[in-house]
Amino acid sequence: MHRIRRAVAAAALLLVTTAACVAAQTTVILVRHAEKAAEPADDPPLTREGQARAQRLAEYLRDAGVDAIYSTAYARTTETAKPLADRIGVPITPAPLQGGIAASARELATRLRNHRNQTVLVVGHSNTIGPVIEALGAPRIPPIADEDFENLFIVIITADGTASLVRARF
């Protein structure tokens, strides 16, 4: 079952990335950080399972043409983004966190729209991924459960600003 899910996610990503390149669209890939430790409560690192998921993410996205990576400054998000950043040589750009979740999501969406004709990875949190997707103009997603770490959302923004959403798992 895990292999099927991985194959479907890889196929969806390949289709989206290919379509984005052909039609000069902006592709934004959004994931929640991988599994985190319980302590320290304010900024926990990834667990071994989380580190393995971060490595899988890097493997899945290594040929996706990621041009930029955004992550909040927390250990769990930067540790999720780091394997891909190291593999493809793209620095991790801090995502804005000022003014609350809605304001931060709008600011990040503005920055992401400036990556015209590029592919961008965003690593966030269960309560920030949805607002960023919505701020990009894509359909609203249901809340991400606290124990759910395998969602991979792909927002495709066309040249006219229209956004569509693909959901996969990794």
Image (cartoon, rainbow, N blue to C red):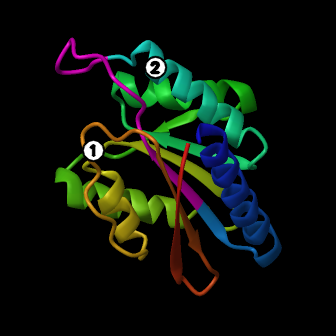
Dividing the picture into quadrants, the one containing residue 116 is bottom right
Magenta stretch encompasses residue 34: yes
Instruction: Name the amino acid, label 2.
Output: Glu
x 74%, y 33%: residue:
88
Tell me where the magenta segment starts and ends, as one range.
Answer: 28-44
Crowding at label 2, few (<14), some or many (≥20) Cα neighbours within 10 Å?
few
Instruction: Name the amino acid, label 1.
Output: Leu
Q: Residue furthest right?
A: 22
**Quadrant occupied by the N terminus:** top right
Give the residue pinned by disc 2: 49
Q: Where residue 144 sits in the image (x, y, percent)?
A: 29, 51
Is 24 displayed left or right of 154 in the figure?
right
Is 167 displayed left or right of 76 in the figure?
right
Circle 1: element type: loop
Q: Where residue 157 sits in the image (x, y, percent)?
A: 57, 74
Predominant SS of the magenta segment: loop
Give the residue pinned by disc 1: 97
Q: Where residue 32 sits in the image (x, y, percent)?
A: 40, 42
Q: Where residue 128 sits in the image (x, y, percent)?
A: 29, 51
